[in-house]
Amino acid sequence: MGKRKKHKSQKEDDVKLVVRIEAELRDAFIETCQAMDTTASREVRRFIRDFLARSGDES
C-alpha cells in the first residue's frame, strides 16, 4: 500500500511564548479581551505583528 504524504497544518508550525507578568495585570487583560469579544492570544499576536511592522522587521 502507498504511503500518504502528511501535510503540515498551520497548528503544527505554532509555538508557545512564555511571558511572566503580574497576576493582576494578566487578569485585567483577559477580562478586557473577553469584554471586547476577543482572546488574549489574538491580541498578543496582533501586538507582535504591529510592533514588527513599526520597527521595520515584517517577517
Image (cartoon, rainbow, N blue to C red):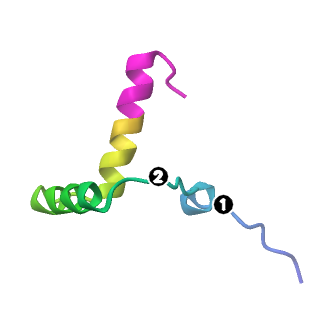
Check if residue 50 falls in the magenta segment: yes
Q: Which mark is residue 47?
A: none
Image quadrant in which the C terminus is located: top right
Q: Quadrant of residue 16?
A: bottom right
Magenta residues, dominant SS class: helix
Residue at 36%, 56% (x, y): give it: 41
The amino acid marked with disc number 2 is: Val
Residue topped by disc 1:
8
Q: Is residue 35 left or right of residue 49?
A: left
The amino acid marked with disc number 1 is: Lys
Residue sitting at the far left:
35
Camera-nearest label, 1 or 2? 2
Residue at 41%, 34% (x, y): give it: 49
Residue topped by disc 2:
19
Image quadrant in which the N terminus is located: bottom right
Q: Is residue 51 left or right of residue 11?
A: left
Check if residue 14 falls in the magenta segment: no
SS of the residue under disc 1: loop
Q: Quadrant of residue 27?
A: bottom left
Residue 59, relative to residue 8: is it above or below?
above
Point out residue 20 in the picture as x, y percentages from the top left corner: 45, 54
Q: Earlier in the sequence, mark 1 or mark 2?
A: 1
First to last magenta residue range? 49-59
Point out residue 30 in the picture as x, y percentages from the top left corner: 23, 61
**Residue at mark 1 to residue at mark 2: CA–CA distance:** 27 Å
Mark 1 is surrounded, within 10 Å at the Cα level, by few (under 14), some (14 to 19) or many (20 or more) other residues, namely few
Residue sitting at the far right:
1
Residue at 34%, 38% (x, y): give it: 47
